[in-house]
């Protein structure tokens, strides 16, 4: 029970009790934690106190909110390694995420992507995928490929292969390197609806541009990941400084 005479706030005490239950395994990953109403009744506190206790757990990355279902102990995080040329598709399969192709079409390429890929990409083959595990959606991607691939790439082929495979095996391109940019962004309504989160919840955006052996940009992908379910890892050489890669 909580100590009402303590200098520690009641919501912090409740949060500490729940955190201890999570650490001790009394509350298991993917298990629903007590609701605000249940905490109010158990500890005889206000709704605001209950809400603040749950918010502490959320800020610590211990729980995740699921719209219409409640708040749950966070399950296994997606840990994505950075630094290689591995396709996101293949990497996620190895982590037991299921890719689902949502859309494939020839489309006018957005201006921001044209500025990256060049005027020859006024039109492109567009692929939109979602990545999930069980009922939990971890992220989605928007990929822009050469429009010429539309004549050979079918829906089943795109659904079962990474973009890199489509480029190399079915498009005949040789890939040399890729550039990757990472940003933290608030979710807009479209992104929030797809990921089943709240508007303005934080997302991780990975923007990757791949280049041919001749140094020409040939593919661009924007990957949006839920920051409460995913983390990015990178091995840094001893003579490198992360601050050198930060742009104003």
Image (cartoon, rainbow, N blue to C red):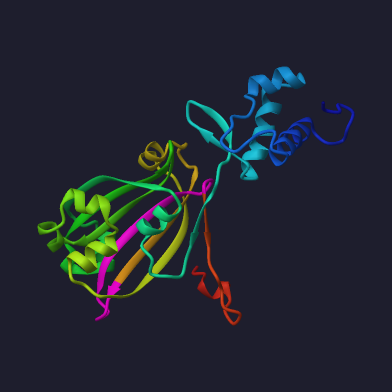
Q: Residue furthest right?
A: 5
Q: Residue at x 53, y 67 (%)?
A: 234
Q: Residue at x 46, y 70 (%)?
A: 83
Q: Residue at x 27, y 60 (%)?
A: 163
Task: In the rendered view, tell whether residue 35 sits above or below residue 118.
Answer: above
Q: Mostly what secondary structure, the magenta segment?
A: strand
Report the front residue among 190 and 131: 131
Residue 201 image point, x, y percent: 49, 42
User: Which quadrant of the figure has residue 33?
Assistant: top right
In the picture, measured across the screen, residue 89 lies left or right of residue 173, that is right
Image quadrant in which the N terminus is located: top right
In the picture, measured across the screen, residue 75 lies left or right of residue 54, that is left
Residue 171 image point, x, y percent: 17, 67
Residue 2 image point, x, y percent: 82, 28
In the picture, measured across the screen, residue 229 lies left or right of residue 63, that is left
Start-end of magenta stretch: 211-229
In the picture, measured across the screen, residue 149 lies left or right of residue 217, that is left
Task: In the rendered view, tell whether residue 100 sits above or below residue 26.
Answer: below
């Amino acid at each position: 029970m909580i100590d009402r005479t303590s200098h520690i706030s009641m919501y912090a005490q409740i949060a500490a009790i729940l955190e201890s239950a999570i650490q001790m395994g009394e509350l298991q990953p993917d298990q629903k934690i007590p609701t605000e109403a249940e905490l109010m009744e158990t500890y005889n506190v206000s709704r605001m106190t209950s809400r603040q206790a749950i918010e502490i757990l959320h800020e610590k990355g211990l729980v995740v909110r699921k719209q219409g279902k409640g708040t749950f102990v966070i399950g296994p995080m997606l840990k994505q390694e950075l630094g290689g040329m591995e396709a996101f598709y293949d990497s996620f399969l190895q982590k037991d995420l299921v890719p689902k192709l949502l859309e494939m079409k020839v489309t006018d390429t957005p201006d921001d992507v044209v500025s990256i890929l060049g005027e020859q990409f006024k039109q492109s083959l567009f692929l939109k995928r979602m990545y999930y595990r069980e009922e939990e959606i971890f992220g989605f991607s928007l990929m822009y490929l050469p429009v010429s691939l539309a004549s050979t790439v079918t829906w089943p082929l795109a659904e079962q292969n990474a973009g890199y495979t489509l480029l190399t095996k079915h498009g005949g391109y040789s890939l040399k390197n890729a550039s990757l940019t990472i940003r933290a962004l608030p979710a807009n309504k479209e992104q929030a609806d797809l990921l089943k989160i709240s508007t303005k919840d934080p997302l991780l955006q990975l923007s990757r541009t791949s280049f041919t052996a001749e140094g020409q940009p040939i593919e661009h992908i924007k990957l949006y990941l839920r920051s409460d379910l995913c983390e990015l890892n990178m091995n840094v050489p001893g003579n490198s400084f992360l601050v050198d890669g930060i742009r104003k």
